[in-house]
Structures are given as structure tokens and as C-alpha cells.
Amino acid sequence: MKTFVRVAATAAVVAIATAQRMVACPSCSDNFTKGSANAALGEAYSWSVLFMLAVPISIVTAFGVAMWRKQRSHSRA
């Protein structure tokens, strides 16, 4: 377990340290540059990806909570 934590911590540090270099292709990085003409477009793409990731997670979480509550109420009865 200690090895896993050490490897995970090392991977996290490397990912954080190199995050600026991992910006995507040159045109994508230009779109995210503040003050550029396409900054709003780049931010819109970013928000749309975040929403697309959040919707399935929200649905699965809501379904899981509903099943947990139903199981909990069923076991009390």
C-alpha cells in the first residue's frame, strides 16, 4: 500500500509540475490565451466538456443514492 501511495504522489507531483506543458495543440492553446480574439470560444469548449462529464456522473450518483435510500428503508421495515 505504501508503494501505491508513493507512486500516486509522484505521479500527481509530475502532472502538476508539467501541467503548463500539457496544453493541447497550438491552436487550442491559442484559444485559451486570455485576451485573444478566440478566448471566449476556447472557454466555451472547456465549459461544454465539463458539463458533458458532469451529466453522466450526476445521473449515476442520483441513481445510486436512490437505490441506497430504497435499500435502507426496505431493511428498516
Image (cartoon, rainbow, N blue to C red):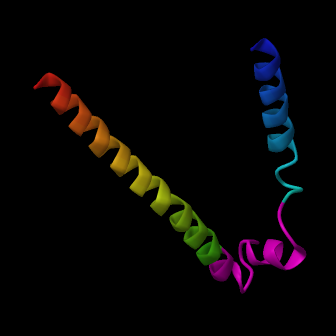
Residue positioned most to the left: 77
Span colored in magenta: 23-42
**Quarter of the view holding residue 6:** top right
Q: What is the quadrant of residue 22 in the picture?
A: bottom right
Vertical position of residue 66 compared to residue 4: above or below: below
Quarter of the N terminus within the rendering: top right
Q: Position of residue 39 (x, y in %)?
A: 69, 78
In terms of depth relative to the viewer, which is nearer, 71 or 69?
71
Q: Is residue 46 above or below residue 39?
A: above
Q: Is residue 40 magenta?
A: yes
The residue under the point 76% across, 21% down is: 5
Q: Position of residue 64 (x, y in %)?
A: 37, 44
Q: From what the image shows, is residue 48 above or below residue 19?
A: below
Q: Position of residue 70 (x, y in %)?
A: 22, 38
Report the residue that reaches farthest toward the bottom: 37
Residue at image position (43%, 52%) is: 60
Q: Is residue 48 left or right of residue 19?
A: left
Q: Residue at x 60, y 68 (%)?
A: 49
Where is residue 69? Give x, y as percent.
24, 37
- 59 to the left or right of 16: left
Q: Residue at x 40, y 47 (%)?
A: 61
Tell me if 77 is positioned left or right of 57 in this view. left
Say how many tags the image has.
Answer: 0
Residue 65, magenta (yes or no): no
Nearest the viewer among 67 and 29 is: 67
Residue 52, relative to residue 1: is it above or below? below
In this image, 10 relative to 51: left or right? Answer: right
Position of the C terminus, as image quadrant, is: top left
Instruction: Looking at this view, name the residue that lies furthest to the top.
Output: 2
Q: Quadrant of residue 41?
A: bottom right
